Amino acid sequence: MTIRSRPAAGVLLVVALATAGCSGDDDAKRASAAPSVSSFSAPAATGLPEAPTPSPAPSGTGGASPSLPGSGAPTVARQGPTQRRPASPPPVVLPQRPAGAPGATQVVTAFKAAGLKVPHPKDRSVDCGPDGLGLGCSEVVATDAVTVYVFPDETSASDIAETWGGQSYRRGAVVLNYLAAKTPAADRPRYEKVLDSLG
């Protein structure tokens, strides 16, 4: 190495050291500025479960939540759908029997007074309406011997008597029905005679 090259080598050496010193200072500054691993709050490995993180309150109008006792806030109870009760049908109003026509009970009483059998009389007037036979009659009294129907007019009585054919007898608005009866055919004229006598 010549004398001329020594100063150049010395300059290079000074530059290299200065560069190394600067970079070393920069690395130290970066290391001190960067957060250390220990500065993060990592959960300790203790084997215990972590505390649950509270979830945010739901947004929306899903209804008021009930308040705790003693909190002073009003409690809002949720109500289910309103149930409507079906309207009950109006009571059936049977047509009135015509003025002057005997009632079914009156006819049965007359049969009994004449010595005719009328066992187990039952008022079955409900059968006149739409929930029963729907005949449109005013009154019905059934016995084991004969059934007495009273209609609101003679036309209705006549139509029913024709429908029942030889198993009935009509006088005005009153029809005697023998279809479900145990009355012998020979005794039927006696019942009919008592009915005729009632006018």
Image (tube, rainbow, N blue to C red):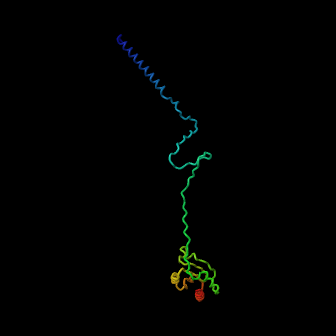
**Total tally of numbered discs in the picture:** 0
Q: Is residue 187 visible?
A: no
**Image vertical order of residue 64 relative to residue 17, above or below:** below
Q: Nearer the viewer, residue 8 or 172?
A: 172
The answer to which of 36 and 102 lies nearer the viewer is 102
Rendered-image quadrant of the C terminus: bottom right
Q: Residue at the location (55% across, 35% down)?
A: 43
Residue 153: in sight, yes or no? yes
Q: Position of residue 99 (x, y in %)?
A: 56, 81
**Quarter of the image where the N terminus is located:** top left
Q: Quadrant of residue 20?
A: top left
| In-image side of 118 versus 131 (left or right) | right
| Relative image position of residue 13 (x, y in whole percent) | 40, 16
Q: Position of residue 168 (x, y in %)?
A: 55, 84
Measuring 54% from the left and 79% from the top, which residue is drawn there?
152
Q: Is residue 147 left or right of residue 24?
A: right
Which residue is most to the top? 3
Q: Position of residue 122 (x, y in %)?
A: 61, 78
Vertical side of 140 occupied by 91: above or below? above
Left or right: residue 18 versus residue 96 is left
